[in-house]
Amino acid sequence: MLQSCIRKVTQQLVQSTFKPSYLKSCNRLTVLEQTWHKIPTAYTLRNMADDVTSGLDDTQVKLLAEECLLVDDNDKVIGSASKKECHLMTNIEKGMLHRAFSVFLFNSNNELLLQQRADAKITFPGYWANTCCSHPLNVPSETEEEDAMGVKRAAQRKLKHELGIEPEQVPLEDFHYITRVHYQAPCDNPVWGEHEIDYVLFLKKDVTVKPEPNEVQNYVYYNPQQVKELLQRAKSNTEKVSPWFALIAENMLDGWWEKLKNLDTIKNHDRVTRLK
């Protein structure tokens, strides 16, 4: 079986590498020597990207096939790429940037719903983050630009997927599009990272939470002081907090929290804030 596979691979590589006229002019040994010399780069290196998912959670690997929206620095859509392609550091280092969103859901006590990402997650497993963080996909319902309606639909979809929050509890008209932030961060596993223009969405609702274990391992409602304490624990390495949530919390969240009764005063749709 192995010999048959080797013969087939060799034959395909020979045919794709050399012109028929060259094959006729060379003896078989010369062709084989040159062919096998090319195999490490033609096959092994070509398929290295597939090896990065080896040993990862099957459900999460399947989600890597989702098509995200590629954008330029001004958030103009310029194409699409798989979730896997968007999160490989080799692509991020070349400038690949995609659209994302971060939901901040506050209950009637003005407490923020935080989630701890499941250990099965490929990027930032086990990290604490805001309520829900994901991506609009390259589908008509999630590419509508007006009032970030496509992003809101994606957020509603992922709140159901990750936290079991029914769409009826979070209707689209209750999402408040606040602003956009741009950040980049590598994961602990250097193969993966984030490079996103992130739409910040606020919700003020009391909801029923039923987490999907493959997505979320824990959740809490925190007040501003408790969030500050969480960030301090992260700095002392006793907790892990996602880079996007840490950047937003340290630079913007306090001022926003104070304005929950008047969100229109903090909305900024004209500018993308660069966070580092």
Image (spheres, rainbow, N blue to C red):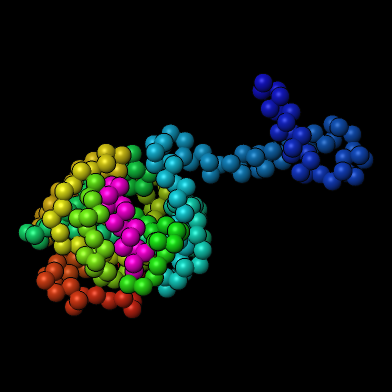
Residue 272: quadrant of the picture = bottom left
Q: Residue at x 34, y 55 (%)?
A: 134
Quadrant into which the N terminus falls:
top right
Is the stretch drawn in magenta largely helix, strand or loop? helix
Where residue 133 appears, as percent x and y from the top left, is 30, 55
Q: Which range of residues does the magenta coloring cover? A: 148-163
User: Could you tell me if residue 96 is visible in this image?
Assistant: no
Q: Residue at x 48, y 52 (%)?
A: 82
Residue furthest toward the left?
109
User: Could you tell me if residue 52 is visible in this image?
Assistant: yes
Q: Residue at x 74, y 39 (%)?
A: 13
Where residue 188 appears, as percent x and y from the top left, is 36, 46
Question: In the depicted view, which residue is nearer to us: 269 or 206?
Answer: 206
Residue 9: quadrant of the picture = top right
Residue furthest toward the front?
168
Where residue 68 appears, as percent x and y from the top left, is 44, 57
Position above or below: 156 against 10: below
Question: In the depicted view, which residue is nearer to us: 234 or 167?
Answer: 167
